[in-house]
Image (spheres, grey):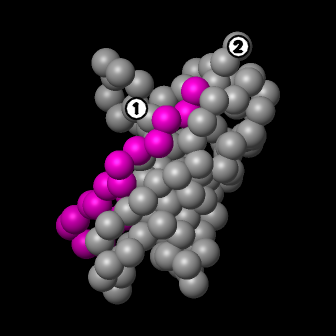
Amino acid sequence: VQLQASGGGLVQTGGSLRLSCAASGTMFDFDGMGWYRQVPGKQREWVARITRGGRSFLSDSVKGRFTISGENAKNTVYLQMNSLQPEDTAVYYCNLDRGARTYWGQGTQVTVSS
């Protein structure tokens, strides 16, 4: 499984971005896909997850501002980020869970200027 994340960039406070994560390779029986973020010097933080069946979960820090969705036909998951704040600045990583394994994408930088 290969994951390609895109959509990061520089945005002002209050702005929006949409991240995409396209999965390729052997996709059968995956459990879900999600997003994490990481700031230098800190642990990777879970942001959102969507199951194969379409159930979505968001961390409290982004609930009400971010939305996760999936497009099964394209094996792609999206993270719509609205009302961005400087504390959302991080490298965002997508992942895919399949059984005991987790696959990671390369990360995309999101920078929110104040």
What amino acid type is highlighted by mark number 2? Ser
Q: Farthest residue in the left direction?
A: 100
Instruction: Tell me the distance, in whole angstroms, between the alpha carbons under discs 1 and 2.
Output: 19 Å
Residue beneath the point at 78% across and 28% down: 14
Query: Relative to the observer, which residue lies in front, 103 or 101?
Result: 103
Horizontal side, residue 41 vs residue 23: left or right: left
In the displayed structure, 102 sits above or below 17; it is: below
Magenta portion: prevailing SS class: strand
Horizontal side, residue 43 vs residue 67: left or right: left
Provide the residue span drawn in magenta: 95-111
Helix, strand or loop at label 1? It is: strand
Residue beneath the point at 40% across and 32% down: 38
Query: Relative to the observer, which residue lies in front, 94 or 64?
Result: 94
What amino acid type is highlighted by mark number 1? Gln
Residue 86 position, x and y percent, is 63, 20
Q: Is residue 89 located in the magenta-colored stretch of the structure?
A: no
10 Å crowding of disc 2: few (<14), some (14-19), many (20+): few
* Occupied quadrant, residue 13: top right
Residue 98 position, x and y percent, is 29, 72
Helix, strand or loop at label 2? It is: loop
Residue 92 position, x and y percent, is 47, 41
Q: Which residue is mark 2?
A: 114
Q: Is residue 97 located in the magenta-colored stretch of the structure?
A: yes
Residue beneath the point at 48% across and 66% down: 22
Quadrant where the N terminus is found in the figure: bottom left
Residue 66 position, x and y percent, is 67, 45
Horizontal side, residue 74 vs residue 2: left or right: right
The disc, 1 or 2, on the residue closer to the chain's N-terminal end is 1
Q: Which residue is mark 1?
A: 38
10 Å crowding of disc 1: few (<14), some (14-19), many (20+): some
